[in-house]
Image (cartoon, rainbow, N blue to C red):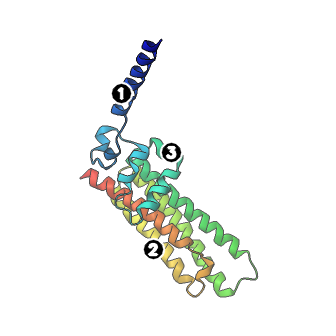
Amino acid sequence: MEYHNVTTLFLLFLVTIILFSIAPHPTTAADPNHHKTGIKGATLIPTACRYAVKKGFCNAMLEADPNSKDADLPGLGLIALRQAASNASDIAEYFKTLLNDSSLDPEVQDGASECLEMYLDAAEQLDDSAAALMSKGYKDVNAWVDVAITDSKSCDVALVGHESVLGGKSQVFRWLCENALAVNKVLVDEKN
């Protein structure tokens, strides 16, 4: 009976060692040759976010998307762009709702109207960026994401003196855009 327990323990130990030896190691996340080794998903996210200004935010946002688990680097780039585009659309909807408020100060209504146009344009620029990324047009991705960021900053200017209307939405939007630019920079590095 005791021989059977020792054999079972030994086999369990052996299986555990084999599983640990074939599992990806955390150090592979920083592997610049991840595209050759097949690293995907959560293990690749730190590499994708290495140029992000807010690395923790970038990591958290990419990890929050269920599609990131099996995504390669271009897939993570698309996720980042879609998150930013979705946020731009949400902000545009917020401004549409705001414009229906008849009690709103006319100056704020004017600013909100400008912001609506700016965020609709930003969402369109980010959609164009996604198409560019899929065709490996990384310079176009940078250009269009930069335009989206400029749209957001223009909205801030349109609401100067009424910053509380935005409530930090523009800053979060720009962080999402910066995530997309960070992943794109990694893709450019790979290309070269």
Residue 43, relative to residue 109: is it above or below? above
Which secondary structure lies at badge 2? Answer: helix
Count of numbered marks: 3
Name the residue tied to disc 2.
150
Residue 67 in the image: state x and y as whole percent. 51, 45
Q: Residue flagged by tag 3: what amino acid is it?
A: Asn
Which secondary structure lies at badge 1? Answer: helix
Residue 113 in the image: state x and y as whole percent. 62, 77
In the picture, measured across the screen, residue 99 lies left or right of residue 137, that is right
At 55% from the left edge and 69% from the top edge, which residue is drawn? Answer: 119
Q: Are marks 1 and 2 in contact (CB under 8 Å)?
A: no
Q: Residue furthest front?
A: 2
Q: Residue flagged by tag 2: what amino acid is it?
A: Thr
Residue 13, relative to residue 87: is it above or below? above
Front-most of 10 and 53?
10
Front-most of 109 and 14?
14
Name the residue tied to disc 1.
18
